[in-house]
Amino acid sequence: MASFPLVSATGMLGSGFRAESLDKAISLGARMIGCDAGSTDLGPGPLATGICMFSAAAVKRDTEIMVIRTFKAGIPLIIGSSGTSGSDAGLAWMVDIVHEIAREQGLHFKLAVIHSELSREIVRRHLRDGRARALPPSAPLSDTDIDAATHIVGMMGVEPIQEALKSGAQIVVAGRSSDTSIFSALPLLEGYAPAVVWHMAKILECGAAAVAVRTAPDCMMAELHEDSFDVFPLCEDYHCTPQSVASHTLYENADPFELKEPSGTLRTDKARYEAISDRAERVSGSEFMHDREYTIKLEGVRRVRIFDDPNGQLIGGFLQDRTTIALAGMIEREFGGFTVPPKL
């Protein structure tokens, strides 16, 4: 089986990357571009409000670079978890940006839009049928919990993305999806081994985060083989090591050796990480165990409280990070408050 090269533009759409890194990936034969646009790092705010954690200008900048290059190269572009949360509002916001770029650049392509927001009734029906349960250590899911939810999204696997690709879409903009599904959908469709594909996707999901020392977000490239994959950064100043790649395998996982996906579990306890150059690593030996039950993680948000903060900021169940308020209080106590900077 021939190798399958692909590239992750950056770890989070809007965080930036070097356009020349993406150009290099395409010159090396990348067969698709993927980019995660979601995060739960901010808590429930983005899902509650539909507001992206990055500005429209930042997201458009990154998206425009990808759209222009995927169009010229004739390869697919897959964006997952649009608008940070993957909600219908975040997805619509992301699609508007893609349409704006297409109009301004005079581009015509087939676009697939995949929704992930679910109605409360669908979730209630699954709960009644015994097909919805809480993730431990949460309390059992109840009708009251569902009724209180203002937005619920289901974290999709590869299948909806694969259907979009099979329909001929060149650009896929998806709602909430697992980070790895973005990079696994096409290689699995092409027949590559699930263990190799899912482990590769885990390393690519955050762009250049798996390098030894990352000073700024950038692209990361992988090349799939029959029983292994190679991974390397596009920035010449970056390099991967066995430790940096193995470390990223552990990233955001409750179990260091079992990575749960909708269709199964990736086991990495037998994985091998080998340097093949001073910048690239080869990974092999993982196993993928298909589950008898296909599961989709649900993420929901409910209104807890809202009140006006004395510092003029709105704080409530949606916005619980009080760091900026604590900082303002410290400045007030230590320095007597803020002063207007001099005009230049």
Image (spheres, rainbow, N blue to C red):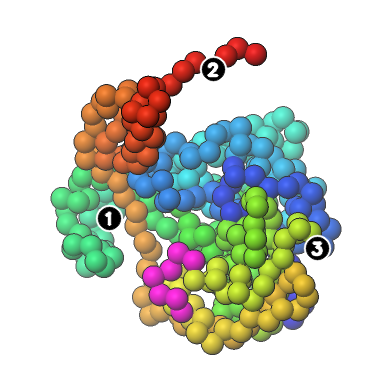
Give the structural element (helix, strand or loop) at label 2: loop
The foreground one among 136 and 217 is 217
Q: Amino acid at mark 2?
A: Pro
Instruction: State the residue position of label 2.
Output: 341
Image spot of residue 46 (x, y percent): 41, 41
Residue 250 has which mark?
Answer: none
Which quadrant would the C terminus be assigned to in this image? top right
| Number of other residues with Cα within 10 Å of mark 1, as a class: few under 14, some 14 to 19, many 20 or more | some
Q: Amino acid at mark 1?
A: Val
**Could you tell me how far apart the alpha carbons at marks 1 and 2 are, in whole angstroms?**
52 Å
Instruction: State the residue position of label 3.
Output: 29
Image spot of residue 99 (x, y percent): 63, 35
**Residue 225 visible in the displayed image:** no
Q: Look at discs 1 and 3 and give the one toward the viewer.
A: 3
Instruction: State the residue position of label 1.
Output: 123
Asked if 155 appears above or below 245 in the picture, the reply is above
Q: Residue furthest front?
A: 334
**Could you tell me how far apart the alpha carbons at marks 1 and 3 are, in whole angstroms?**
43 Å
Q: Is residue 253 magenta?
A: yes
Which quadrant would the N terminus be assigned to in this image? bottom right
- Main SS of residues in magenta: loop
Q: Look at discs 3 and 2 and give the one toward the viewer.
A: 2
The mark total stands at 3
- Highlighted magenta segment, given as a residue range: 251-257
- The answer to whether marks 1 and 2 mark residues whose Cβ atoms lie closer than 8 Å is no
Point 78% across, 75% down: residue: 277
Point 21% across, 44% down: residue: 148
Comes first in the chain, label 3 or label 2: 3
Image spot of residue 248 (x, y percent): 55, 68
Comes first in the chain, label 1 or label 2: 1
Q: Is residue 6 magenta?
A: no
Image spot of residue 126 (x, y percent): 26, 61
